[in-house]
Image (tube, rainbow, N blue to C red):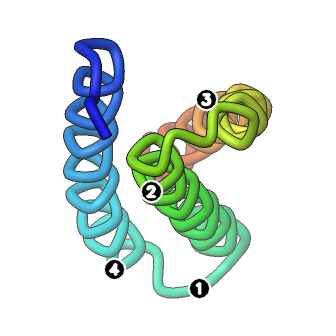
Amino acid sequence: MAYNLITFITIISSFIGILFFIYSYFVINKIKAIFPSGNVRKKWNLIQILIGIFLSGYITNIIFNLIENTEIVLIITAAVYIFGGIFAFIVINLSHKTYKLIVKD
């Protein structure tokens, strides 16, 4: 199997994305420690679940790129776009709520 430059860049990009998601997962644990209970903490838990979904997608993307199954890679890419939009929406709303909660106290 000869991998082209695009496949190589895709795989390296996925690995870099995985590292950022793992780091983010641990940062969320620090944020959750500030809010021991309540709705805000539940939303941060949801963010961690979405990070898990992204990690699964990135890992699956690497695997299917390595075995050159382009149809599955296209489906994974579409799913990442959908979950990325959901993720951005939740993060923005949660950041706003968290900020308001911190400023209130």
Closest to the observer, 88 or 102:
88
Instruction: From this view, report whether residue 93 is shown above or below residue 62.
Output: above
Query: Can you identify the residue that label 2 sits on?
Result: 63
Q: What residue do we see at 72% from left, 43% from top?
A: 72
Q: What residue do we see at 24% from left, 45% from top?
A: 15
Residue 103 location in percent, x, y?
44, 40
Specify few, some or many for label 3: CA neighbours under 10 Å numbering under 14, 14-19, or 20 or more. few
Query: Can you identify the residue that label 3 sits on?
Result: 92
CA gap, disc 1 to disc 3? 20 Å
Specify few, some or many for label 1: CA neighbours under 10 Å numbering under 14, 14-19, or 20 or more. few
The answer to whether residue 87 is seen in the rendering is no
The amino acid at mark 2 is Ile
Nearer the N terminus, badge 1 or badge 3? 1
Query: Can you identify the residue that label 1 sits on?
Result: 37
Q: Secondary structure at mark 1?
A: loop
Q: What residue do we see at 25% from left, 69% from top?
A: 26
Residue 54 location in percent, x, y?
55, 52
CA gap, disc 4 to disc 2? 35 Å
Instruction: From this view, report whether residue 45 is shown above or below residue 99.
Output: below
Q: Secondary structure at mark 2?
A: helix
Nearer the N terminus, badge 1 or badge 2? 1
Query: Can you identify the residue that label 4 sits on?
Result: 33
Nearer the N terminus, badge 3 or badge 4? 4
Closest to the observer, 80 or 64:
64
CA gap, disc 3 to disc 4? 20 Å
Closest to the observer, 21 or 42:
21
Residue 77 location in percent, x, y?
66, 30
